[in-house]
Image (cartoon, rainbow, N blue to C red):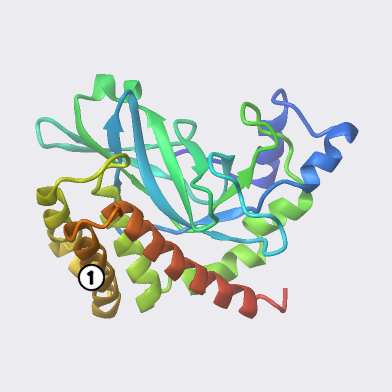
Amino acid sequence: MFRQIASLAAIAGLATGLGTVDAGAAGKKAELPQVLGLVATKLPVPLECTDGSCTGFFSAFCLQEQRPKPNEGHVYDAAGEGDITMVVEKRDGSIAEFSAAGLLHFESTGAYTSVRISMDARRLASLDAKSVSLTVPRRVSLLPRSEPTAAARPSAEDLDAATGDKRLLAEGYFENGAPRADAGAVLSRLINLLPAEGYAPKAVRDGAWGKAASPASLKAFSPEGLGTAREAYDRCRAYADQGYKVRLRGCLENSHDKLMKILNDKYWEGDAGF
């Protein structure tokens, strides 16, 4: 299984031929948004495949408090030790797993608390796929691009944030099985069960919790985390059912972002020694 970027040397090698930051771009480099960390997933996260693209919502966190947050659509490149795995359920019921290295596109949702990960659905044509999911391991980070179409050589500061002590420390805040971390993960699962655009029909809204709180989820996540996520789901569903101009998915995304920001604040406060 290939690693997305197996070492610092590999990251530097990736930049060869893709363009490096020259003196004229140095000022622009200083304005790049924050390096992000991807939260490891306890269970595969399903992608929604429409219009030739398969896309999912994934929890993230900021590794650089002083840098500006990313604008919506800012493109990132994966870095770090982990290799994201693509899990394909075929139409015959069998399951196949592949390295997703080189197949994924990463972009910000407009906050440091989440990203969209997508892939070209045509990649699945030969696999007779019924559905596709992604599994994110620990220690995957995202480096911001200076240009959308080409990765630049990352700075030493960004590499340290993506792969060094700060990234290791983050595991204790975002991947430790604490109630807030688990609630964020369950909300992420709920979000991916709802359409990215438009309003979800009532039947879809009502059935989302049952799918998110599957037997596997009940084993993977703490009761407290599940309870917090359920409270957010019930509140957001009530708004949608009562005719408020709010999408269930959008409301859940707001709840997810609030939880992740609390965790990020705690991480930054505990990060003072680095």
Quadrant assignment for the N terminus: top left
Which of these two is toward me, 54 or 17?
A: 54
- The residue furthest right is 23
Where is residue 19? Give x, y as percent.
74, 27
- Does any portion of residue 26 appear in the rendered image? yes
Q: Is residue 136 at least partly visible in the picture?
A: no
- Which amino acid type is marked by label 1? Arg
Query: Relative to 80, is 126 above or below?
Result: above
The residue identified by callout 1 is 230
Label 1, secondary structure: give it: helix
User: Of 111 and 6, which appears nearest the observer?
Assistant: 111
Task: Residue at 18% x, 63% y: name it.
Answer: 213
Residue 101 appears at what percent x and percent y? 47, 36
Image quarter (top left, top right, bottom left or bottom right) of the C terminus: bottom right
Q: Position of residue 64 (x, y in %)?
A: 67, 61
Q: Residue at x 34, y 63 (%)?
A: 185
Residue 65: where, in percent of width, then height?
67, 64
Horizontally, residue 272 falls left or right of residue 251, namely right
> Which residue shows up at 25% across the image and 47% down it?
194
- Position of residue 51 relative to residue 268, above or below, is above
Query: Foreground: 15 or 24?
Result: 24
The reply, left or right, for residue 219 in relation to residue 71 is left
Q: Would residue 93 appear left or right of 34 to someone viewing this image?
A: left
Quadrant of res 190? bottom left
Q: How many marks?
A: 1
Q: Quadrant of residue 28?
A: top right
| Mark 1 neighbour density, 10 Å: few (under 14) some (14–19) many (20 or more) | some
Q: In the visual, does 189 lie left or right of 253?
A: left
